[in-house]
Amino acid sequence: MPLSQVLKEHKLMKVSENSIHLWNRMLKIHGLSQTLAYLTTFNYETESIKNIINNLHLPAGTDKEQIETLLNVLGKTVVESGFSSDQELLTTIDQWNAMLKLNGADETFAFLATCNYNDSMIKFIIANLYLPETINPVIESDKTITAERSTITSDFQSNQELLNTIDQWNTRCKERGPNECLASLSKLNYKARSIKFIMANLQLPKTMDRLANTQKIVEANKMNIISNFNQKIKIIAKKKKTLHSLNHIINNLELPKLDAEILRKKIILKTQKVIEIGVKKHLAKMNFAYKKTQTQVYIKQMQQEPNEIGIYLGKSHLKDLKRKAINSISNEHLSEPKKIKLSLQR
């Protein structure tokens, strides 16, 4: 794509001093090659690239001018960073740190694995989390990237949607008050970690117990998910999905183990029942068709070939005809002399 067309279609990003700090953390954890590779996917303007390079803690002997030239070329032809602005980058890191602070590292990494982030985004985010010293960000990045992310569907299709959702709930909280905001959150069908992320980033009064309210809303949403699923069980069962597909559906709900197992048994039994009814109907049709065919064959055989019943009926009919014929002849012989005698008497 020509550079002039790229500049026309994509607004160039300006870097801030705060985001340069983020790039240095990425450099420290993942090294120069991966940092520069990801930096090329950002649509930074020329001055911003120069500013970043000049402020990166690069290894001694690194040719900054050569790197700057390379980034200016590649950075304007590949725009796949996942962030549309420098502010979006900063906001994303802030919100993930809020998630970490409220819910801990395990929940944060688990939710991060379900979001639609590319590998470089995951590395960048984890590199900028305020993790305990006992946690290795490189190892956790690899774990998150290699997790079976495709098996879980996120409540949010993109990072922009996630940020917009937080912004909308904060606006609602400001306009209608925190109590009404939390009550509305309780009526949704969000997965537990989605609620935890939202609650970690809501601008609530300090007097509110954020963690306790989070647990209440998670429980309410869980019940909503279960109720909604129970209403769809018949529809899902009629599709006669495989056991693997049914397990995928249940796992995607991200429910506690006990609740998930109850729904798993219910949908499997319901599906088996539907399949059983279908098999019985099919066998009944086959049985009826077979009986009908055999009956037609038997009738045809009766019509075309002699058989014991036919022979018996034939013999019986002949006997009857013979008996009638003999009786008829006998009657004629007996009646003739009487007629003669009568005529003589006259």
Image: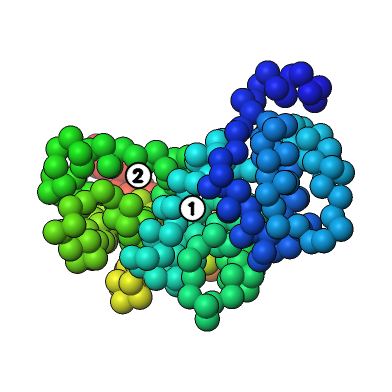
Q: Residue at x 45, y 72 (%)?
A: 106
Toward the viewer: 138 or 317? 138
Q: Label 1: how many residues lie within 10 Å, few (<14), some (14-19) or many (20+)?
A: some
Return the x and y of residue 346 as percentages of the image width and height. 24, 37
Q: Is residue 7 left or right of residue 255?
A: right
Q: Residue at x 37, y 65 (%)?
A: 101
Q: Residue at x 64, y 56 (%)?
A: 24
For mark 2, give the secondary structure: helix
| Amino acid at pointer 2 | Ile
Indicate the colouring scheme: rainbow
Could you tell me how far apart the alpha carbons at marks 1 and 2 are, in whole angstroms?
A: 13 Å
Residue denoted by label 1: 93
**123 w.r.t. 91: above or below:** below
The numbered dot on residue 166 is 2
Toward the viewer: 134 or 46? 46
Identify the image quadrant of the N terminus.
top right
Toward the viewer: 157 or 264? 157
For mark 1, give the secondary structure: helix
Q: Is residue 125 left or right of residue 183?
A: right
Quarter of the figure with residue 307: bottom right
Return the x and y of residue 22 as percentages of the image width and height. 58, 53
| Amino acid at pointer 1 | Ile
Q: From this viewpoint, is residue 252 visible? A: no
Quarter of the figure with residue 128: bottom right
Q: Residue at x 17, y 52 (%)?
A: 205
Toward the viewer: 345 or 153? 153
| In front: label 1 or label 2 | 1
Nearer-N-terminus badge (1/2):
1
Q: From this viewpoint, is residue 93 visible? A: yes
